[in-house]
């Protein structure tokens, strides 16, 4: 079983930055595929970024060049650095994990709110 706890959300002005953290327990993040998703009010949850166990990172087109996903194996934590934030980035951000043999994300954190004011 994998437990995920997000932190780092908050209120920021457009153009600002935030770094979200996802602390994992139960498994080491280097042995998992880790992802970030977000859900804005009235919208479906959408993919933001993922970091595979072999360090390959992929991003949604809407955040490419602005967001960076990374991990710290010593802290067993995954990060999402968000720069040049826009009001449309406002959402609840969720950390997710899946084991290498799983095709979809099955472990989810509780979410952290990010609000970008214009």
Image (spheres, rainbow, N blue to C red):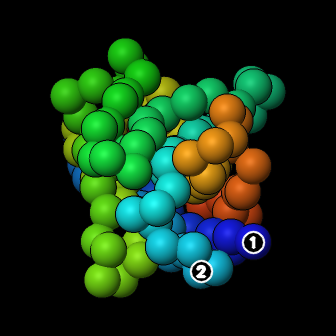
Callout 2: 10 Å neighbours few (<14), some, many (20+)?
some
Callout 1: 10 Å neighbours few (<14), some, many (20+)?
few
> Where residue 13 sits in the image (x, y, percent)?
33, 48
Between 5 and 75, which is closer to the camera in this rendering? 75
In the image, taking residue 37 as reference, residue 74 lies left or right, namely left
In the image, taking residue 61 as reference, residue 109 lies left or right, namely right
In this rendering, is residue 1 above or below 109? below
Quadrant in which the C terminus appears: top left
| Furthest-top residue in this view | 61
> Where residue 61 sits in the image (x, y, percent)?
37, 16
Q: How far is disc 2 from disc 1 in space, using C-alphas? A: 8 Å
Secondary structure of residue under mark 1: loop
In this rendering, is residue 33 above or below 41? below
In this rendering, is residue 102 above or below 8? above
Residue 2: which quarter of the image?
bottom right
Residue 34 at least partly seen: yes
> Where residue 26 sits in the image (x, y, percent)?
64, 79
Between 59 and 19, which is closer to the camera in this rendering? 59
What count of labels does the image hold? 2
Q: Residue at x 72, y 57 (%)?
A: 107
In the image, taking residue 41 as reference, residue 83 lies left or right, namely left
Residues at discs 2 and 1 in contact (Cβ within 8 Å) = no
Q: Residue at x 64, y 43 (%)?
A: 101
Q: Which mark is residue 25?
A: 2
Q: Which residue is mark 1?
A: 1
Q: Which mark is residue 69?
A: none
> Where residue 113 sits in the image (x, y, percent)?
60, 56
Secondary structure of residue under mark 2: strand
Quadrant in which the N terminus appears: bottom right
Q: Residue at x 28, y 47 (%)?
A: 55
Residue 19 at least partly seen: no
């Amino acid at each position: 079983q994998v437990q995920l706890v997000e932190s780092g959300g908050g209120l920021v002005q457009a153009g600002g930055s935030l770094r979200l953290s996802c602390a994992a327990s139960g498994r080491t993040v280097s042995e998992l595929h880790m992802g970030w998703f977000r859900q804005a009010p009235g919208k479906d949850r959408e993919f933001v970024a993922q970091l595979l166990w072999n360090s390959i990172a992929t991003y949604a087109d809407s955040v490419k060049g602005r967001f960076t996903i990374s991990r710290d194996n010593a802290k067993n934590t995954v990060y999402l650095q968000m720069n040049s934030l826009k009001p449309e980035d406002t959402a609840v951000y969720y950390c997710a994990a899946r084991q290498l043999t799983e095709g979809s994300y099955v472990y989810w954190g509780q979410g952290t709110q990010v609000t970008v004011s214009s």
